[in-house]
Image: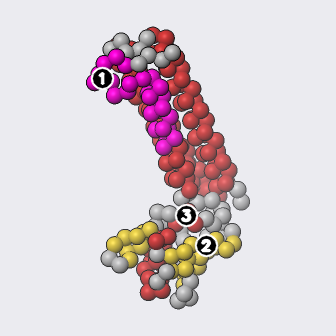
Amino acid sequence: MKSEQPQAGSSPFATVVEVEKAAETRMEKVIADLQQGMASVRTGRASIHLLDGVTVEAYGSPMPLNHVATLHVPEPTMITLQPYDSSQINAIEKAIRSADLGLNPSNDGKLIRVPVPALTEERRREMVKHLHHMAEDHRVAIRNIRRDSNEALKKMLKDKLISEDDDRRSHDSVQKLTDTFISKLDSAAKTKEKEVMEI
C-alpha cells in the first residue's frame, strides 16, 4: 500500500505513483523527440520527412512545406511536391535548395521533383556519428528524469510523506523505467543506423 501525503505544499507530488507516472510521461516525450529528430536524418531512400525542417516564405510568413504543397514519394529515389498555389513553386524550390540538405530540386511549372542522390560511404558515416550524438543527448535526458524523480522521492521520505519501503520500491520502479526507455532508445537508434548504412 502506497502512503498518501498527509500535508500539502511540501512536495509537488502527492504519492510515489505520481512521481513514477510523471517520470514515465517525460521519458515517453524524450523517445518521441528522438524519433522526430531521426526522421529528418537521411537514409539511402527518399522520405517526405527529409523535408520536415524546411520552411517556405509564403504569404508573408515562414510556413512548413506540407502547408504549401502535397508531398509524395513516387519511387525510392524521388520526392515530388505539388504546390497548392502554383505561384509559390519558385519559393518552394528555393527553400529546398537553401535548406543545405544536398538536394537539387527542379520544376516543370506545375510539379517540383527532388531526386534523392545515393549517399557516399563518407556521408553515411557522418550521419551515423550524428545519430550517435543525438541518441546520447536523449540518453542523458532520460537519466536526468531519473535523477529528478529520485530527488523528489528523497524529499518525500525526508518530509515523512512516505515510508522507507515506499521509497525503496519507488526507486526500483524508476530504475526499471529508465532501463526500459534507454533500451527503447538504443533499439530505435540501431534501426535507424542500419537504414543509413544500407546501400
Check the image and report above or below for 31 versus 162.
Answer: below
Q: Where is residue 59 in the image (x, y as percent from the top left)?
A: 35, 78
Check the image and report above or below for 32 versus 59.
Answer: above
Amino acid type at circle 2 is His
Report if residue 24 lies within the magenta region: yes
Q: Do tag 3 and tag 2 residues touch (Cβ < 8 Å)?
A: no
Q: Where is residue 101 in the image (x, y as percent from the top left)?
A: 51, 66
Q: Distance between the residues labelled 3 and 2?
A: 12 Å
Q: Which residue is at a point 40% across and 70% down the rendered structure image?
A: 63
For mark 1, give the secondary structure: loop
Q: Which residue is at a point 52% across and 66% down the rendered structure image?
A: 51
Relative to 148, is 9 on the left or the right? Answer: left
Camera-side mark, 3 or 2: 2
Tell me which segment is drawn in magenta. Answer: 5-30
Q: Mark 1 points at which residue?
A: 8
Q: Mark 2 points at which residue?
A: 72
Camera-side mark, 2 or 1: 1
Amino acid type at circle 1 is Ala
Amino acid type at circle 3 is Leu
Report if residue 103 lies within the magenta region: no
Q: Distance between the residues labelled 3 and 1?
A: 49 Å
Looking at the image, which is closer to me, 124 or 156?
156
Q: In which quarter of the image is the C terminus?
A: bottom right
Camera-side mark, 3 or 1: 1
Q: Earlier in the sequence, mark 3 or mark 1?
A: 1
Q: Which residue is at a point 37% across and 15% down the rendered structure image?
A: 161
Asked whether the viewer can see residue 72, the reply is yes
Q: Where is residue 65 in the image (x, y as percent from the top left)?
A: 47, 71
Q: Name the residue under label 3.
A: 50
For mark 3, give the secondary structure: helix
